[in-house]
Amino acid sequence: MKLLLNQIKQCKLCEPYLPCGANPVMMASSQSKIIVIGQAPGKRVHLTNIPWNDKSGDNLRNWLGIDKELFYDTAVFALMPMGFCYPGTGKNGDLPPRKECAPLWHPQLLEKMNEKKIFLLIGAYAQNYYLGRNAKSSLTETVKNFNHYLPTYFPLPHPSPRNNIWQAKNPWFKSEVIPSLKSIISDLV
């Protein structure tokens, strides 16, 4: 696993398309049980080299009912975005994750993880990639039907503060999804 993680850290495949340069940010070990698959690092994560080191990460840890120490324990969590480098900013926020990373690196990483129990699919990019045709017609419907994907996958919206409006429109998320998520995570940690 160590060799593979070093190869990923040295990856420059997408560098010509990255305004801030290549800086793959992820964490994993062969013991990781909970695989968190997000979108791509934001600017702050790019600068600090710490996955989910922003408000979105704070919200995600709150949803999971855990602290930072546990979240960054690679014997428990693998933090693998769809795109490992910060893609830059567009008109409406960060650009989509680069498409090269997941097909290149995810299979190699997952093959080395012997303890994986569940995948937390955060956002539409991860859900569409991993669920394929089994994803519902919208992220909202996929998340609402989270039980359909258990025990392997648990789809979630992105925990960005920008999604507070989505959460306000979908109160079932906090009343139904979050308690189930916390229970599952508690059983695994």
Image (cartoon, helix red, strand yellow):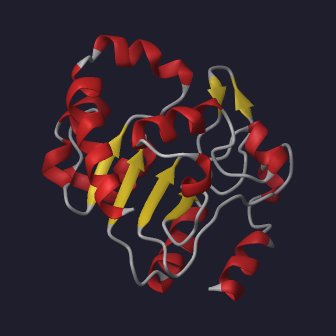
Q: Is residue 143 visible?
A: no
Q: Residue 105: x and y, percent?
A: 57, 73
Placement of 74 over or under 1, stated as above or below: above
Residue at 70% over, 39% down: 42
Residue at 65% x, 25% y: name it. 93
Percent x, y for residue 174? 29, 25
Q: Is residue 110 above or below residue 87?
A: below
**Quadrant of the snapshot with the N terminus:** bottom right
Quarter containing the C terminus? bottom left
Residue at 47% x, 35% y is 62
The residue positioned 48% from the left and 72% from the top of the image is 32
Q: Nearer the viewer, residue 63 or 144?
A: 63
Place residue 161 in its image quadrant. top right
Q: Who is closer to the viewer here, 96 or 148?
A: 148
- Residue 78 visible from this viewpoint: yes
Q: Is residue 119 left or right of residue 151?
A: right
Please name whichever residue, 64 or 82, is drawn nearer the observer in this view of the structure. 64
Q: Give how far across and how far down residue 179 sits, in percent.
A: 26, 36
User: Residue furthest toward the left?
Assistant: 148
In which quarter of the view is residue 73 placed? bottom right
Q: How many marks?
A: 0
Q: Considering only vertical position in the picture, is 46 above or below 159?
A: below
Image spot of residue 129 (x, y percent): 39, 56
Left or right relative to 154: residue 157 = right
